[in-house]
Amino acid sequence: MSPSRALATSIGFVLLSLTTPLRAQDRPTDVTIEAHVYEPQRLPPTDARIAGLQRPQGFSIQRFAEGLDNPRMLAVAEDGTIYVTQRQPGNLVMLRDVDGDGVVDVQKIVARIRHLHGIEIRGREIYLVDIHRIYVAALMPDGSLGRLRTIVRNLPDAGQHPNRTLEFSPQGELFVSIGSTCNECREPNPNHATLQRIDQYERHGAKREIVASGLRNVLGYGWHPSSGRLYAFDNGIDMLGDNEQSEELNEVESGKRYGWPYVYDHDQINPHTEPVKLTSEQWAELSEEPVGLYTPHSAPMQMIFYSGSQFPIEYRENAFVPMRGSWNRKPPSGYEVLRIRFSAGGDFEAFEPFVTGFLEPLPEGQFGFFGRPVGVATAIDGSLIFSDDTNNMLYRVAATASSGTPAPQVLAQEIFDVPASLQVSSPAVPEGGMIPRKYSDYGKGISPPLRWASAPQGTQSFVLMMEDPDAVSPLPFVHWTIVNIPAGHTSLPQGVRKAFQPVRGAPLRQGSNSKTEVGYFGPRPPPGDPAHAYHFQLFALDTQLNLPDGFNRNALLKAMEGHVLAKGDFIARFAQPE
């Protein structure tokens, strides 16, 4: 979607002003709540917008990886390989910056688990969690996984908060967060709204112990490195008002309760519900108060204590938390990465914005956004990596100047200043015509047939790149890349096999598209969009390319530099079927 078209789509808000006569334990409740349902307008994450993000002086920020399809939690292996979970498609993706320039070159799906979310790495083993199960597998030298083994299979049902997260304590104990099934209710199962410890050595029917309760939905937690004190950032109750409930930072101690669902902030009583055998005031007396309160509805996600040496010394033993952003507050809150300052002894000191500016004011008091931070990790070089599950990318923040340059956000043909002499066409689609449904993601999802002519003298191979410049993110969206098409070839059949090496014995290789899948991904424009234009771009090269399995657009464009002799472009369109 182009910037102008994105701005033309507005998302309104609903003002809730409620006077609710409720009764709990024979006491009337009469509370007026003013709240908003407000979701800012999505904007393209252009390089200009990313460069304009506010961060501390001396820090750089840039695109690190893209085309990741709902990236959530992050973990980094000892060799520097980064792993990211994709909740919605249910994938685990391996990322590598092969040349060390601060931009990912290889991205590859290495596991498929439905509802996959939490991730933790300990030594050469990776731990993963979906709604009900925790898995473990060995990490292989090439970044793939050994056999996945299930070590926990009885986590409770999820309800409203199905996203579990994993962390290891300094003592090597595995912890898992179990969110509540609701916004605010009397949970029938005491396992919900808790932080739990797992005996992972009991491979079947592992024991679970509730460490702390009254935690509505903790996705980010961790241990202060020097003191070993455990902190957890809880997501507050929705629809209590624009400025209630705060997001709570709690110091977690074993056996303690933390307020939810009857008490929030500093002994504030939830007017909507009360415990059965206690009063809310009594519940408050039995609950621990938070050590820090942050802007309501900011939505804290993964939390890490910085473990690198690249950042200035004052960042050591501080925590970082992506705040994904509100959907029920006006003005919106969150859409940032937060720094949490701690003393050397592990005492909470202050919240401090670290990366802000993903929210952008629009006319008439409205707002747009171009990023929703979710996962965070310290890379092996000490830079900070965080994910954006809406624009499907990862960002890198470094305490140095950027060492590499991400691929330009323009069509590949605009990057190479060579003659546009290749003639590209398709026997199945007229130039500028509509792509038949069977070649789309709504149909069979097979690639269309292509043909070309007029290769210049000296051509050793062809590269094909199918890109959509009308997408919001990535810019452009990559649907297909093939390298090392032999110089003597003048066509491709329909239905090229989806594999790194689609034809056995031939030099053809396919790269990772913007769904992190190898091979062709058919058109699938968003609902309501006009027809997108899909560019089948062909390049004649004076060499063949040596690229690894899982190579992405960034790696391909770098490999093509200095080797492109000519280019050609065939354009076809597609709109979502009615």
Image: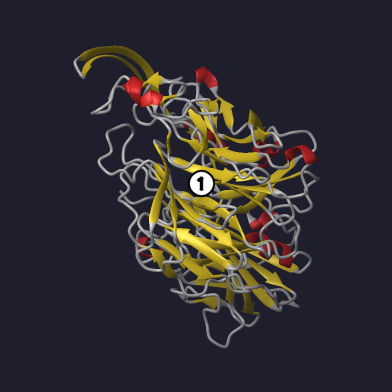
The picture places residue 94, in percent across and down from the top left corner, at 57, 63
In this picture, is 566 found above or below 535? below
Residue beneath the point at 21% across and 19% down: 25
Q: Quadrant of the rendered structure where residue 355 is?
A: top right
- State left or right for residue 269 relative to residue 519: left
The picture places residue 146, in percent across and down from the top left corner, at 51, 74
Residue most extreme to the bottom: 505
In this picture, is 517 found above or below 384? below
Residue most extreme to the left: 26
The picture places residue 293, in percent across and down from the top left corner, at 53, 26
The picture places residue 430, in percent across and down from the top left corner, at 46, 62
Q: Which of 515 and 18 lies nearest the eye of the viewer?
A: 18
Q: Which amino acid does label 1 sit on?
A: Asp
Residue beneath the point at 71% across and 79% down: 460
Q: How crowded is mark 1: few (under 14 residues within 10 Å), some or many (20 or more)?
A: many
Q: Which of 297 and 371 lies nearest the eye of the viewer?
A: 297
- State left or right for residue 303 relative to residue 105: left
- State left or right for residue 329 relative to residue 336: left
Q: Which colour scheme is used?
A: secondary structure
Residue beneath the point at 57% across and 88% down: 505
In this picture, is 205 found above or below 197? below
Q: Is residue 535 something one can see in this rendering?
A: no
Q: Is residue 219 something one can see in this rendering?
A: yes
Q: Which of 109 and 256 lies nearest the eye of the viewer?
A: 256
In this picture, is 254 found above or below 126? above
